[in-house]
Image: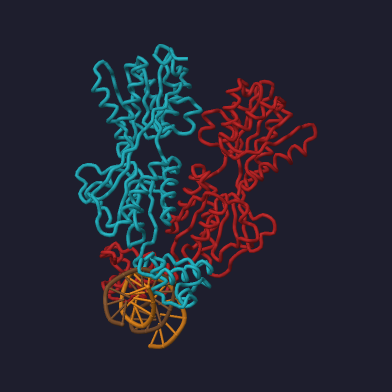
Chain colours: A cyan, B red, C orange, D brown
Amino acid sequence: MRRTTKTITLRQIAKMAHTSKSTVSRVLTKHPSVSPKTRARINQVIQKQGFRPNLFAQGLAGGRTGLVAVLTSEINSGFYAEVIKGIDQVAGQHEGHLLSSFAHGTKDYIDLWKNLAAGGRVDGVILIAPPLDIFSERVRPDDIPIVLCSSRPQGLAQGWERVDSVTVDNHKGINELMRHLVDQKHKRFTHIAGPHDIYDAVERFRAFNQFIADHPGLEGEAIQTNMTMEGGRTAVLDYLKRGERKTDAFVACNDFAALGILEALKESCIDVPQSVAVTGCDDDPSSAILGLTSLRMPMIDLGREAGRLLFDRLGRRDEQPLARHSLLELALRIRATSQSKTGPTATLP
Amino acid sequence: MRRTTKTITLRQIAKMAHTSKSTVSRVLTKHPSVSPKTRARINQVIQKQGFRPNLFAQGLAGGRTGLVAVLTSEINSGFYAEVIKGIDQVAGQHEGHLLSSFAHGTKDYIDLWKNLAAGGRVDGVILIAPPLDIFSERVRPDDIPIVLCSSRPQGLAQGWERVDSVTVDNHKGINELMRHLVDQKHKRFTHIAGPHDIYDAVERFRAFNQFIADHPGLEGEAIQTNMTMEGGRTAVLDYLKRGERKTDAFVACNDFAALGILEALKESCIDVPQSVAVTGCDDDPSSAILGLTSLRMPMIDLGREAGRLLFDRLGRRDEQPLARHSLLELALRIRATSQSKTGPTATLP
DNA sequence: CTGAAAGCGCTTACAG
DNA sequence: CTGAAAGCGCTTACAG
C-alpha cells in the first residue's frame, strides 16, 4: 500500500547539489552554519525541483511542524470564522498551518484538544472561547504552548502559569454602553445573559451587575439564555408573559440574542426604541443594517493577536515568559435601537 | 532540542501487552488478522494508558493520517464557516482532522493547495469555491483524492477525471426565483452579478440570462461586481446615477450584494418592494430578519456531502470510480423585498 | 562550515 | 494469527 509517490526527497536534493543530507536539512531549518555559497546552490536546486520537505518526516524527526491546532465550538463556528482567519494570517507569515476542529460540548472540546495535542502532533494550540470547565483541576494544559482566545484561566488554575491569553475589555465596553443608555434617560435594565461557562458571557454579566451596583437609582435584573436568536426571543416572550414589563432597556449579551429580542418585541407590537431600547454585543454585520446598537468585537484582531502570542512563544528557544495577556477594545456603535426621543442625542442633527 | 516528551509509544504498549509492535500496529490500523483475545488485551492497555499513536510517524510510515486539507478564500471565510463545519463533522466520524487555510487570491490559492498536498502531507483535499483558473492546463490535480465544493471542472480539464464535486442547482433555483418575480408582474430585471471566476456566480449569471432568453417579453441586463455589500451598493448607486431606472427587480448573485442594494435604495429613498423588488441568494441568517427574499444555500450539507465523497474515496483500496457529482437543492425563501401589492401573493392572508 | 550516523514512532511485506 | 526487520524522510548531536 505504499503510496505511488514519485515525490522528490531531501536525499535527492543533496545528490543534485553535490552535498550531504545534513547540509540540505540545515538550509531547510535555516541553520546559520552553512556557507552562503552552498546555501545558494542548494536553494537553487530546491527551487528548480519544487521540493517541499515532508511534513511528517520533519515532525517525526523532532523539528518544527508549523502545525497549530485551533479549537472552537460548533455553536459559534460562524461567529468565529473571522478569528480563525486572523490566526491563519499570522500562521501564514510563519509558514504554519492550522489544524482546526469544532467541538460539540465540553467533553468533546477537551477530547479534541487532547487528541490534537497528544503525541507531538502540533507545535501549539489555540483554544477559542473554551468552556470554562477546562480550568478545573482534572484538566491539565499541555507541555506545548497554548493560547486562550476570548478566555482566561479562572480561579487557581494550577499549571496555567505560562498560558497566554487575549480577550476584549468587556467591563469597559459594557460600561460605555450602559452610560450611553443612562444618557438616554433609561433607568431600569434587563440583561439577557449568556451561559455561565463562556468567558465573555460571564464577564458581560458581571460588568452589567457592577454597573448597576455602582449607580444608585438604577434597577437591574438578568435572565439567562443561550446566545442564540431563539434564546433571546423566548426569554423576552416569557418575560412579557409574566406581565411585569417595567424595563427601559434590554441589554443582550450578544447580537444574536438581541435579534431574537427584537423579533419578540415586534411580535408583541412593542415599539423599539420608543417603548424600550435594545442593545447587542459583537456587532455582527447584520446589526448595522438593522440599526442595532452594539459593541464592536475586533474578531480578526483577536485572531491575529492570538497567533502573534503563539508564534512568539514558539520562536523562543528556551526562555519561556510567564503568562501574557492582551486586552483589546470593544467599540460602541450607537444605532437606532437605543435612541430615545427624549435622550440628548435626539437633539443632534 | 528533542522534545521533553514522555509520551507513551507503541513500543511500550507492545511490551505492556506482552506482544510485538507489529500486532499493536495491526490493532491500530484495524487489520483483521488479529485474534479477538489479543486484540482485546491490547485495546485494554491502549485505553488504560491513553495511548494515541503519533500522527507524524503514521504518516511517514505510509499509513493513513486522517488529515484532510480544506482550502477556501479569505473573501468568503465567514460565509463558508458552515461548509467547513459540515466537512469537520464527517471527518470526525472517520477520526480525521482538517488542515485548513484561507487563500488571498488565485495564485495564493494554488500555492497553498500544492503546499498542503505536496509530499504526502494529507490524505485528501477539499477545495471550496476555488477560482476557476485552477482548471487551466497549467495546474494539475494531485495523485491524492480531491473533492470540489461549490465548483466543477470547466472545459476539457484534463486530469480531473476522478475528481468528485458537489454543487447546488443554481439553474433550478434561479428559475424558481425568476418565476416568482414574474408572478409578481415584474418584467424588467437587473442582475447584479459576481466575479467571472467563481463557479456559483457564473452559473447564476448564466441561469439568469437563460431565463430571460427563454421568456419573450422580459427584459434583462447584468452589472458585474464583487460579491460584497459595498459592491452591491455602489453598483446600484451608479446605476441610479445613470438615470435610466427602468428596472422592476434587482436580482443579486448573493445576499451580501443584495444588502448593499437595499442600502443604496434606502439612501436614494426608493421604496422596496413598492418601487422595485430585490432578491438575494444564499439566505444569510440576517436575510430572514431583514425580510430579504433569497435562495437558501444548504451550507452544512455541502460540507457534509464533500466530506462523504472524500472519505468514501479514501475508504476504497484500489477501485477508484470516475468523477461523481452531487447536486443539492436551493430553496426559495419568499419574503418582503419581493412582494408586490399587485402580485398574486398579496391576496393571500 | 560539512558529513556519516543514529534515531524519531510508526506500517507493512516477509517469513513463520 | 504473530514477530523480527526494513524503511518512511527528515533532524540533530557528534566528529571532523
Residue at 27%, 31% (x, y): give it.
Answer: A206
Q: What count of labels does the image hold?
A: 0
Residue at 47%, 29% (x, y): give it.
Answer: A287
Task: Please name whichever residue, B295 or A185, is drawn nearer the observer in this view of the structure.
Answer: A185
Q: Is residue B310 left or right of residue A337?
A: right
Q: Residue most toward the right?
A: B216
**Percent coordinates x, y for residue A155 in the rendering:** 21, 42
Residue A317 in the image: above or below residue A21: above
Residue at 47%, 62% (x, y): give it.
Answer: B122
**Percent coordinates x, y for residue A53 in the rendering:** 45, 67
Task: Please name whichever residue, A133 or A29, is drawn nearer the observer in this view of the structure.
Answer: A29
**Percent coordinates x, y for residue A102 in the rendering:** 41, 49
Task: Please name whichever residue, A326 or A3, is drawn nearer the observer in this view of the structure.
Answer: A326
Residue C4 in the image: above or below residue B47: below
Q: Quadrant of the C terminus of chain B?
A: top right
Dividing the picture into quadrants, the one containing residue A171 is top left
Dividing the picture into quadrants, the one containing residue C8 is bottom left
**Percent coordinates x, y for residue A201 in the rendering:** 33, 35
Residue A78 in the image: above or below residue A126: above
Q: Is residue A315 left or right of residue B183?
A: left
Res. B245 in view: no
Res. B33 in view: yes
Residue A290 in the image: above or below residue A199: above
Q: Quadrant of the N terminus of chain B?
A: bottom left
Task: Please name whichever residue, B325 or A346, is drawn nearer the observer in this view of the structure.
Answer: A346
Q: Is residue A271 left or right of residue B293?
A: left
